[in-house]
Amino acid sequence: MYRRLAQCVREYKKPTLLTLIFIIGEAIIETFIPFITADMVNKIKGGVDMGVIVRTGIILTVMACLSLACGGLAGFTCAKASAGFAKNLRHDVFKKVQTYTFENIDKYSSASLVTRMTTDIVNVQMSFMMIIRTAIRAPLMLIFSVVMAYVMGGALATAFVIVIPVLAFGLFIIGRKAMPAFHKVFKKYDRLNESIEENVMAMRVVKSFSRENYEKEKFGKSAENIRKDFTHAERIIACNRPIMQICLYFNMVFVLFVGSKMTIESGGTQIDVGQISAMLTYGMQILMQLMMLSMVYVILTMSAESMRRIYEVLCEEPALKNPENPVMSVKDGSVDFDGVSFKYSKKAEKFALSGIDLHIKSGMTIGIIGGTGSSKSTLVQLIPRLYDATEGVVRVGGVDVRKYDIETLRSSVAMVLQKNLLFSGTIAENLRWGNKDATDEELVEACKLAQAHDFIKSFPNGYDTWIEQGGTNVSGGQKQRLCIARALLKKPKILILDDSTSAVDTKTDAFIRSGFRSYIPETTKIIIAQRVASVQDADLIIVMENGRIADMGTHDELLENSEIYREVFTQQVKGGSENE
């Protein structure tokens, strides 16, 4: 895991190495300052002229300035390296998510992925910063200080032999207790973010049913659960401070008591005042570095779960992959289903699709109707290989879809969904998702065919009108027509409309279908609809029921032979006449 995350340093290796160099320089200089100070104290006690004191003072000043410079430069390079590392890590995670198929996305919630790319990466960035700076400086200072303490104090330095193991054992116990607590917290963070995302997306529904108070209460409970878990985790982590204080004061008392006793008894021959002063300084340095190491340990304990969650995303293998020698062109828009069955999960007991045999010639218009849950959308999602068939073969242009380059296949298939999505940007920018090189004239032509041109021109800024995220500032019918125009600009070999005219009136729907016949006559059109009127002029109509093809034929054939189709048609015609 650490090796994979370290790969994200990349072009920031130089500032990372410079940070280490500056930190080593700072540690060496700071370790020698107490040694020189102690030597000066002993010289003053023995009697020395002002020239020596001034020279020693200048040396100490220069060393302090050099230490300060090294520390400042280390802070600058450390900030650059850690921010760059986080940028690369965020890029790698986002890039990996782009390779995911629907099956992979189903494994993680969108809220969880957002948390991993934001909160978790910030935690890992903090850890990286601590590792390349504090986690290097503290051990070096610790080692140098212990060595110098033995040089200066001899047997008096044995206090550190007692203090260090006690502190290390205490931190180990704290880490073991805190890790499961943080694991629970991040799981609940995901659920909290899911609640926020759901509430924001469904804000209109919440307000229309006056359920604001219920949502506040639900959110409050989730937030309170996180507060309790975080409080528990923080209480465990907080135990490191009293342990540090005990070790610190024990060291001070030991050095002062034992050192003073040795000085008095030996008359200053075994240890002198300057050495006791240096021992106290080194003792403070040692314990401060141990405290810094405990902080590093705490941060690493908190971020270990974040690292694991990020690593999990980076190591997730896409469920669908390109073959070794993929087919790089799609001949035509013909589609064949040969004995196709499909289920969303290997663990699922029931197939979503069963025994599908269907052959569509290029350029045909196909209508698909069926009740809710009849797997109409599932059927068409196998065509651009959003999922792979569990059994049987799906062919496009006479070639098994699993043999195509995925991007090539999907570039030849355009899908317009019922829940259409527009991105923040102008109308023109949204349309050019279908064809980034489309001219203004092509945009207008596609929008006229999708019956979108008139309402676009009614906006003050026309095609430069700004669309809010998700298309919240246009109506459902306008959004659908813009998405149809976007798909038309792609000029695909196969066009799939998944109930994508449900929000437009029947007259506009008829105009759109008429535009298809004139603009993309060679494109295979597959129209999923709830209204019989949307598919009755199709070359072939498929009736789905419980994941199977119940009937197929033309409108007239189905009226004569299909009880399901005839019932739907009768209900809609009767309902329409009553409304009139």
Image (tube, rainbow, N blue to C red):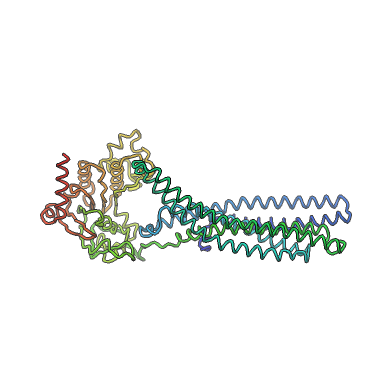
Is residue 428 visible to the viewer in this orientation of the structure? no
Report the front residue among 147 and 455. Answer: 147
| Farthest left residue in view | 560
Q: Where is residue 233 shown, x and y percent of the image?
A: 54, 56
Report the front residue among 430 and 151. Answer: 151
| Farthest top residue in view | 460
Q: Quadrant of residue 264?
A: bottom right
Is residue 215 visible to the viewer in this orientation of the structure? yes
Q: Quadrant of residue 279?
A: bottom right
Is residue 569 shown left or right of residue 489? left
Q: Where is residue 302 shown, x and y percent of the image?
A: 54, 57
Residue sitting at x 82%, y 60%: 260
Q: Where is residue 219 shown, x and y percent of the image?
A: 44, 48
Report the front residue among 544 and 325. Answer: 544
Residue sitting at x 41%, y 63%: 317
Q: What is the count of numbered marks?
A: 0
Q: Where is residue 361 shown, x and y percent of the image?
A: 20, 57
Is residue 366 shown left or right of residue 218? left
> Split into 4 quadrants, where in the image is the C terminus?
top left
Is residue 364 shown left or right of residue 67? left
Q: Quadrant of residue 384?
A: bottom left
